[in-house]
Amino acid sequence: MRLPDKHTHQLIDDLTQSGCSFALYRFPWTDECHFILQYSGEVEKLNDITDLNNQKGFVIAPFQQTDEHPIVLIRPEITAYDWEEITQSLTSLDHAVFSIQPKSTESTPVITLNETERYDRYYAAFRRFMEPLKEKEFQKLVLSRPAFSPIDETFSPLDTFVKACNDYPRMMIYLCHTPITGTWLGSTPEILLSGCAQNWKTVALAGTLPIIDGIEPTEWSDKNKEEQAIVAEYVRKIIKKHGLKMTEKGPYTARAGQLVHLKTDFLFQLKETHYLGNLLKELHPTPAVCGLPKAEAYRFIIENEGYDRRYYTGFVGWLDPEGQTDLYVNLRCMEIRSTEVKLYAGGGILPSSDVRAEWEETGQKMTTMKNIL
Protein backbone atom coordinates (compact mmCIF):
# COMPACT_ATOMS: atom_id res chain seq x y z
CA MET A 1 0.00 0.00 0.00
CA ARG A 2 1.22 3.49 -0.85
CA LEU A 3 0.96 6.53 1.40
CA PRO A 4 -1.51 9.23 0.38
CA ASP A 5 -0.34 12.72 -0.55
CA LYS A 6 1.35 14.75 2.19
CA HIS A 7 -1.73 16.88 2.89
CA THR A 8 -3.99 13.86 3.48
CA HIS A 9 -1.24 12.20 5.46
CA GLN A 10 -1.05 15.18 7.81
CA LEU A 11 -4.83 15.47 8.14
CA ILE A 12 -5.16 11.85 9.26
CA ASP A 13 -2.34 12.24 11.77
CA ASP A 14 -4.06 15.41 13.02
CA LEU A 15 -7.30 13.48 13.51
CA THR A 16 -5.55 11.30 16.12
CA GLN A 17 -5.11 14.48 18.18
CA SER A 18 -8.62 15.81 17.61
CA GLY A 19 -12.04 15.51 19.15
CA CYS A 20 -13.32 13.57 16.13
CA SER A 21 -13.72 9.81 16.01
CA PHE A 22 -12.53 7.79 13.02
CA ALA A 23 -11.38 4.39 11.87
CA LEU A 24 -9.09 3.49 8.97
CA TYR A 25 -8.89 -0.21 8.19
CA ARG A 26 -7.74 -2.68 5.55
CA PHE A 27 -8.87 -6.27 5.13
CA PRO A 28 -6.46 -9.20 4.52
CA TRP A 29 -5.07 -9.60 1.01
CA THR A 30 -6.25 -6.19 -0.18
CA ASP A 31 -4.46 -2.88 -0.82
CA GLU A 32 -7.40 -0.50 -0.46
CA CYS A 33 -8.50 0.88 2.89
CA HIS A 34 -11.86 1.93 4.31
CA PHE A 35 -12.39 5.17 6.23
CA ILE A 36 -15.16 5.98 8.73
CA LEU A 37 -15.47 9.41 10.35
CA GLN A 38 -17.83 10.90 12.91
CA TYR A 39 -17.14 14.63 13.24
CA SER A 40 -20.21 15.84 15.16
CA GLY A 41 -21.40 14.91 18.62
CA GLU A 42 -20.05 12.24 20.90
CA VAL A 43 -19.65 8.63 19.89
CA GLU A 44 -22.25 6.28 21.27
CA LYS A 45 -21.25 4.51 24.48
CA LEU A 46 -22.93 1.15 25.03
CA ASN A 47 -23.33 -0.64 28.34
CA ASP A 48 -23.63 -4.19 27.06
CA ILE A 49 -22.71 -6.12 23.93
CA THR A 50 -26.38 -6.90 23.34
CA ASP A 51 -26.87 -3.14 22.84
CA LEU A 52 -25.18 -3.72 19.45
CA ASN A 53 -28.35 -5.42 18.23
CA ASN A 54 -29.64 -3.62 15.13
CA GLN A 55 -26.74 -1.12 15.23
CA LYS A 56 -24.55 0.06 12.35
CA GLY A 57 -21.10 1.59 12.57
CA PHE A 58 -17.48 0.95 13.50
CA VAL A 59 -17.17 -0.78 16.87
CA ILE A 60 -14.28 -0.85 19.32
CA ALA A 61 -15.13 -2.93 22.38
CA PRO A 62 -12.98 -3.63 25.48
CA PHE A 63 -12.12 -6.91 27.14
CA GLN A 64 -14.07 -5.75 30.20
CA GLN A 65 -16.77 -3.12 29.74
CA THR A 66 -16.55 -0.40 32.44
CA ASP A 67 -17.53 3.25 32.76
CA GLU A 68 -13.94 4.14 31.90
CA HIS A 69 -13.70 1.70 28.99
CA PRO A 70 -17.14 1.40 27.36
CA ILE A 71 -18.14 -0.24 24.10
CA VAL A 72 -17.89 2.56 21.53
CA LEU A 73 -19.79 2.85 18.25
CA ILE A 74 -18.57 5.37 15.65
CA ARG A 75 -21.47 6.64 13.52
CA PRO A 76 -20.56 6.72 9.80
CA GLU A 77 -21.17 10.40 9.01
CA ILE A 78 -18.48 10.07 6.34
CA THR A 79 -17.46 6.82 4.64
CA ALA A 80 -14.80 6.59 1.96
CA TYR A 81 -12.90 3.86 0.14
CA ASP A 82 -9.25 4.17 -0.92
CA TRP A 83 -7.09 7.29 -0.86
CA GLU A 84 -8.78 9.32 -3.61
CA GLU A 85 -12.19 9.23 -1.89
CA ILE A 86 -10.61 9.68 1.54
CA THR A 87 -8.73 12.77 0.36
CA GLN A 88 -11.87 14.27 -1.15
CA SER A 89 -13.83 13.64 2.05
CA LEU A 90 -11.19 15.16 4.33
CA THR A 91 -10.56 18.27 2.21
CA SER A 92 -14.29 19.02 2.20
CA LEU A 93 -14.38 19.30 6.01
CA ASP A 94 -14.15 22.51 7.98
CA HIS A 95 -10.54 22.94 9.13
CA ALA A 96 -11.76 23.44 12.72
CA VAL A 97 -12.64 19.74 12.84
CA PHE A 98 -8.96 18.87 13.01
CA SER A 99 -8.03 21.24 15.81
CA ILE A 100 -10.49 20.23 18.55
CA GLN A 101 -8.53 18.66 21.36
CA PRO A 102 -9.98 15.51 22.97
CA LYS A 103 -10.19 14.69 26.64
CA SER A 104 -7.07 12.99 27.95
CA THR A 105 -7.32 9.18 27.89
CA GLU A 106 -3.85 8.43 29.18
CA SER A 107 -3.44 6.65 32.46
CA THR A 108 -1.05 7.47 35.27
CA PRO A 109 2.54 7.76 33.98
CA VAL A 110 4.20 4.38 33.70
CA ILE A 111 6.91 3.33 36.13
CA THR A 112 9.70 2.04 33.91
CA LEU A 113 10.74 -1.51 34.75
CA ASN A 114 13.82 -3.32 33.51
CA GLU A 115 13.62 -6.74 31.84
CA THR A 116 14.22 -8.65 35.09
CA GLU A 117 11.51 -6.72 36.93
CA ARG A 118 9.02 -7.26 34.09
CA TYR A 119 9.75 -10.99 34.09
CA ASP A 120 9.40 -11.19 37.88
CA ARG A 121 6.00 -9.51 37.66
CA TYR A 122 4.92 -11.92 34.91
CA TYR A 123 6.27 -14.90 36.88
CA ALA A 124 4.21 -13.91 39.93
CA ALA A 125 1.06 -13.70 37.79
CA PHE A 126 1.91 -17.03 36.12
CA ARG A 127 2.06 -18.71 39.53
CA ARG A 128 -1.32 -17.25 40.46
CA PHE A 129 -2.76 -18.68 37.25
CA MET A 130 -1.16 -22.11 37.58
CA GLU A 131 -2.55 -22.88 41.04
CA PRO A 132 -6.26 -23.14 40.04
CA LEU A 133 -5.30 -24.83 36.77
CA LYS A 134 -3.49 -27.62 38.64
CA GLU A 135 -6.49 -27.90 40.96
CA LYS A 136 -8.60 -28.38 37.79
CA GLU A 137 -10.78 -25.37 38.51
CA PHE A 138 -10.15 -24.26 34.89
CA GLN A 139 -9.46 -26.04 31.63
CA LYS A 140 -7.49 -23.05 30.38
CA LEU A 141 -6.59 -19.48 31.34
CA VAL A 142 -5.07 -16.73 29.20
CA LEU A 143 -2.33 -14.63 30.78
CA SER A 144 -1.26 -11.42 29.07
CA ARG A 145 1.16 -8.59 29.78
CA PRO A 146 1.91 -5.06 28.54
CA ALA A 147 5.17 -3.49 27.40
CA PHE A 148 6.15 0.02 26.38
CA SER A 149 8.20 1.57 23.57
CA PRO A 150 9.08 5.29 23.43
CA ILE A 151 8.08 7.47 20.48
CA ASP A 152 9.05 11.05 19.65
CA GLU A 153 7.36 13.99 17.94
CA THR A 154 8.18 12.56 14.50
CA PHE A 155 6.03 9.46 15.08
CA SER A 156 3.26 9.18 12.49
CA PRO A 157 0.26 6.92 13.18
CA LEU A 158 -0.52 6.80 9.46
CA ASP A 159 3.05 5.85 8.53
CA THR A 160 2.81 3.02 11.03
CA PHE A 161 -0.58 1.90 9.69
CA VAL A 162 0.72 1.74 6.10
CA LYS A 163 3.86 -0.13 7.17
CA ALA A 164 1.67 -2.68 8.96
CA CYS A 165 -0.45 -3.07 5.80
CA ASN A 166 2.66 -3.71 3.71
CA ASP A 167 4.37 -6.02 6.21
CA TYR A 168 1.32 -8.09 7.18
CA PRO A 169 -0.88 -8.76 4.13
CA ARG A 170 -2.63 -11.71 5.82
CA MET A 171 -4.02 -9.65 8.68
CA MET A 172 -6.73 -7.06 9.24
CA ILE A 173 -4.99 -3.74 9.95
CA TYR A 174 -6.78 -0.87 11.67
CA LEU A 175 -6.12 2.60 13.08
CA CYS A 176 -8.91 3.89 15.33
CA HIS A 177 -9.24 7.05 17.40
CA THR A 178 -11.99 8.37 19.63
CA PRO A 179 -11.72 10.86 22.51
CA ILE A 180 -13.04 8.09 24.80
CA THR A 181 -10.77 5.20 23.80
CA GLY A 182 -7.69 7.10 22.70
CA THR A 183 -5.77 5.94 19.63
CA TRP A 184 -5.28 2.25 18.85
CA LEU A 185 -3.52 0.46 16.01
CA GLY A 186 -3.68 -3.26 15.44
CA SER A 187 -2.74 -6.10 13.13
CA THR A 188 -5.03 -8.99 13.94
CA PRO A 189 -5.39 -12.45 12.37
CA GLU A 190 -8.54 -13.53 14.22
CA ILE A 191 -12.08 -13.07 12.90
CA LEU A 192 -14.70 -12.85 15.63
CA LEU A 193 -17.70 -12.64 13.29
CA SER A 194 -17.88 -11.95 9.57
CA GLY A 195 -20.61 -12.25 6.97
CA CYS A 196 -23.81 -10.90 5.48
CA ALA A 197 -27.36 -12.09 4.81
CA GLN A 198 -27.44 -15.78 5.77
CA ASN A 199 -23.75 -16.68 5.30
CA TRP A 200 -21.41 -16.17 8.27
CA LYS A 201 -17.99 -17.16 9.53
CA THR A 202 -16.02 -17.29 12.75
CA VAL A 203 -12.78 -19.05 13.69
CA ALA A 204 -11.04 -20.84 16.51
CA LEU A 205 -7.43 -19.65 16.66
CA ALA A 206 -5.03 -20.95 19.30
CA GLY A 207 -1.55 -22.40 19.63
CA THR A 208 1.54 -20.43 18.62
CA LEU A 209 4.94 -21.22 17.12
CA PRO A 210 7.57 -18.86 15.67
CA ILE A 211 8.73 -18.91 12.06
CA ILE A 212 12.49 -19.46 12.11
CA ASP A 213 14.67 -18.50 9.11
CA GLY A 214 11.55 -18.21 6.97
CA ILE A 215 10.53 -21.83 7.58
CA GLU A 216 7.04 -22.46 8.95
CA PRO A 217 6.92 -25.23 11.58
CA THR A 218 4.67 -28.20 10.88
CA GLU A 219 4.92 -30.19 14.14
CA TRP A 220 2.63 -29.11 16.96
CA SER A 221 3.04 -30.04 20.63
CA ASP A 222 0.27 -31.71 22.60
CA LYS A 223 -0.09 -28.49 24.61
CA ASN A 224 -0.80 -26.44 21.45
CA LYS A 225 -3.19 -29.06 20.08
CA GLU A 226 -5.09 -29.23 23.36
CA GLU A 227 -5.35 -25.45 23.58
CA GLN A 228 -6.77 -25.22 20.07
CA ALA A 229 -9.22 -28.07 20.68
CA ILE A 230 -10.60 -26.31 23.78
CA VAL A 231 -11.25 -23.11 21.82
CA ALA A 232 -12.76 -24.97 18.85
CA GLU A 233 -15.18 -26.95 21.03
CA TYR A 234 -16.45 -23.78 22.72
CA VAL A 235 -17.02 -22.00 19.39
CA ARG A 236 -18.69 -25.11 17.97
CA LYS A 237 -21.25 -25.15 20.79
CA ILE A 238 -22.08 -21.46 20.35
CA ILE A 239 -22.58 -21.80 16.58
CA LYS A 240 -24.79 -24.87 16.98
CA LYS A 241 -26.95 -22.83 19.35
CA HIS A 242 -27.33 -19.77 17.09
CA GLY A 243 -26.60 -20.95 13.54
CA LEU A 244 -27.70 -23.45 10.93
CA LYS A 245 -25.89 -25.79 8.52
CA MET A 246 -22.48 -25.42 10.16
CA THR A 247 -19.40 -26.72 8.38
CA GLU A 248 -15.80 -26.82 9.62
CA LYS A 249 -12.40 -26.56 8.02
CA GLY A 250 -9.36 -27.45 10.08
CA PRO A 251 -7.50 -27.35 12.28
CA TYR A 252 -4.75 -26.19 9.93
CA THR A 253 -1.61 -24.09 10.26
CA ALA A 254 -2.20 -20.39 9.55
CA ARG A 255 0.53 -17.76 9.33
CA ALA A 256 0.26 -14.38 11.10
CA GLY A 257 3.35 -12.20 10.69
CA GLN A 258 6.36 -14.17 11.93
CA LEU A 259 4.18 -16.61 13.85
CA VAL A 260 1.90 -19.52 12.97
CA HIS A 261 -1.24 -20.65 14.77
CA LEU A 262 -3.64 -23.58 14.64
CA LYS A 263 -6.90 -22.46 13.09
CA THR A 264 -10.36 -23.90 12.46
CA ASP A 265 -12.90 -22.09 10.26
CA PHE A 266 -16.59 -22.34 11.08
CA LEU A 267 -19.07 -21.51 8.30
CA PHE A 268 -22.76 -21.27 9.16
CA GLN A 269 -26.06 -19.59 8.37
CA LEU A 270 -28.16 -17.15 10.40
CA LYS A 271 -31.88 -16.69 9.99
CA GLU A 272 -31.94 -13.26 11.67
CA THR A 273 -29.14 -10.66 11.52
CA HIS A 274 -30.64 -7.86 13.61
CA TYR A 275 -29.61 -9.59 16.83
CA LEU A 276 -25.90 -9.99 16.17
CA GLY A 277 -25.21 -8.51 19.60
CA ASN A 278 -26.70 -11.62 21.23
CA LEU A 279 -24.32 -13.87 19.30
CA LEU A 280 -21.34 -11.56 19.96
CA LYS A 281 -22.08 -11.62 23.69
CA GLU A 282 -21.61 -15.39 23.71
CA LEU A 283 -18.57 -15.40 21.43
CA HIS A 284 -16.72 -12.64 23.31
CA PRO A 285 -14.40 -13.16 25.00
CA THR A 286 -13.52 -16.45 23.33
CA PRO A 287 -11.41 -19.03 25.19
CA ALA A 288 -8.55 -17.93 22.91
CA VAL A 289 -8.27 -14.69 24.92
CA CYS A 290 -9.96 -15.69 28.19
CA GLY A 291 -10.31 -19.34 29.20
CA LEU A 292 -12.81 -21.97 30.28
CA PRO A 293 -15.19 -22.09 32.04
CA LYS A 294 -15.71 -18.70 30.43
CA ALA A 295 -17.51 -16.69 33.15
CA GLU A 296 -15.24 -17.93 35.94
CA ALA A 297 -12.07 -17.47 33.85
CA TYR A 298 -13.14 -13.95 32.92
CA ARG A 299 -13.57 -12.97 36.57
CA PHE A 300 -10.30 -14.64 37.56
CA ILE A 301 -8.33 -12.73 34.91
CA ILE A 302 -9.80 -9.39 35.95
CA GLU A 303 -8.94 -10.07 39.61
CA ASN A 304 -5.52 -11.70 39.17
CA GLU A 305 -3.80 -10.61 35.97
CA GLY A 306 -2.44 -7.48 37.62
CA TYR A 307 -3.26 -4.80 35.03
CA ASP A 308 -6.12 -3.44 32.91
CA ARG A 309 -6.26 -4.85 29.36
CA ARG A 310 -8.46 -1.94 28.24
CA TYR A 311 -9.33 -2.61 24.55
CA TYR A 312 -6.75 -5.36 24.05
CA THR A 313 -8.57 -8.71 23.49
CA GLY A 314 -11.80 -6.83 22.91
CA PHE A 315 -13.00 -6.59 19.32
CA VAL A 316 -12.97 -4.04 16.52
CA GLY A 317 -14.51 -3.64 13.09
CA TRP A 318 -17.50 -2.78 10.97
CA LEU A 319 -21.00 -3.83 12.04
CA ASP A 320 -24.00 -3.72 9.71
CA PRO A 321 -26.96 -6.10 10.24
CA GLU A 322 -28.35 -5.29 6.79
CA GLY A 323 -25.02 -5.45 4.94
CA GLN A 324 -21.51 -6.80 5.45
CA THR A 325 -20.16 -7.23 8.99
CA ASP A 326 -16.45 -7.77 9.69
CA LEU A 327 -15.44 -7.89 13.36
CA TYR A 328 -12.00 -9.01 14.57
CA VAL A 329 -10.52 -9.85 17.97
CA ASN A 330 -8.20 -7.00 18.96
CA LEU A 331 -4.85 -8.82 19.02
CA ARG A 332 -1.31 -7.69 18.09
CA CYS A 333 -2.24 -4.14 18.96
CA MET A 334 -0.76 -0.98 20.42
CA GLU A 335 -2.22 1.95 22.29
CA ILE A 336 -0.65 5.17 20.98
CA ARG A 337 0.03 7.74 23.71
CA SER A 338 1.85 11.08 23.69
CA THR A 339 5.42 9.86 24.32
CA GLU A 340 5.13 6.07 24.08
CA VAL A 341 3.12 3.20 22.71
CA LYS A 342 1.74 0.49 24.94
CA LEU A 343 1.99 -3.02 23.49
CA TYR A 344 -0.04 -6.02 24.59
CA ALA A 345 0.35 -9.79 24.17
CA GLY A 346 -0.89 -12.93 25.85
CA GLY A 347 -0.97 -16.69 25.65
CA GLY A 348 -3.02 -19.66 26.76
CA ILE A 349 -1.95 -21.30 30.04
CA LEU A 350 -2.58 -24.99 30.70
CA PRO A 351 -1.38 -27.16 33.62
CA SER A 352 1.49 -28.30 31.37
CA SER A 353 2.66 -24.76 30.53
CA ASP A 354 6.21 -23.56 31.20
CA VAL A 355 6.69 -20.00 32.41
CA ARG A 356 9.81 -19.28 30.35
CA ALA A 357 8.20 -20.62 27.17
CA GLU A 358 5.08 -18.50 27.76
CA TRP A 359 7.19 -15.39 28.46
CA GLU A 360 9.06 -15.90 25.19
CA GLU A 361 5.82 -16.53 23.27
CA THR A 362 4.32 -13.22 24.43
CA GLY A 363 7.55 -11.50 23.47
CA GLN A 364 7.38 -13.02 19.98
CA LYS A 365 3.79 -11.78 19.61
CA MET A 366 4.85 -8.26 20.57
CA THR A 367 7.39 -8.19 17.75
CA THR A 368 4.49 -7.93 15.32
CA MET A 369 3.95 -4.36 16.53
CA LYS A 370 7.58 -3.59 17.45
CA ASN A 371 8.69 -4.32 13.88
CA ILE A 372 6.54 -1.53 12.45
CA LEU A 373 7.66 1.16 14.92
Image (spheres, rainbow, N blue to C red):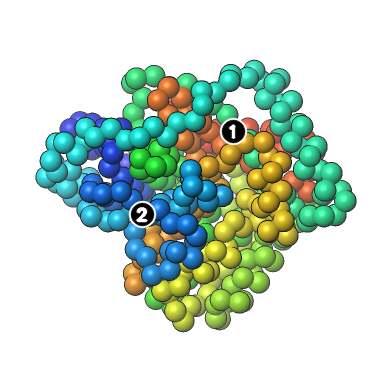
CA separation in Å, label 2 and label 1: 28 Å
> Looking at the picture, how far across and down is residue 184, in whole percent?
43, 39
In this orientation, does residue 9 appear?
no
Numbered circle sitting on residue 44 = 2
* Residue 105, disc: none
The x and y percentages for residue 212 are 63, 36
In the displayed structure, 340 sits above or below 362; it is: above
Q: Residue at x 43, y 64 (%)?
A: 52
Kindly identify the amino acid type of the residue bearing the numbered disc 1: Pro
Q: Which quadrant would residue 194 be assigned to in this image?
A: bottom left
- Secondary structure under badge 2? strand
Residue that carries the numbered disc 1 in the rendered image = 146
Q: Is residue 288 left or right of residue 133?
A: left
Q: Is 321 placed left or right of 144 in the picture?
A: left
> Left of 119 or right of it: where is 37?
left
Is any atom of residue 183 visible in this view? yes
| Of residues 339 and 198, the one drawn nearer to the viewer in this rendering | 339
Q: Earlier in the sequence, mark 2 or mark 1?
A: 2
| Most distant residue in the front direction | 67
> Measuring 46% from the left and 49% from the top, which residue is drawn there?
70
Residue 196 spot, x, y in % from top left:
40, 71
Quadrant for the C terminus, please.
top left
Where residue 39 appears, as percent x and y from the top left, is: 23, 47
Tag 1, which secondary structure?
strand
Q: Is residue 168 above or below residue 281?
A: above
Quadrant that contains the N terminus: top left
Which three-letter amino acid code belongs to the residue tagged 2? Glu
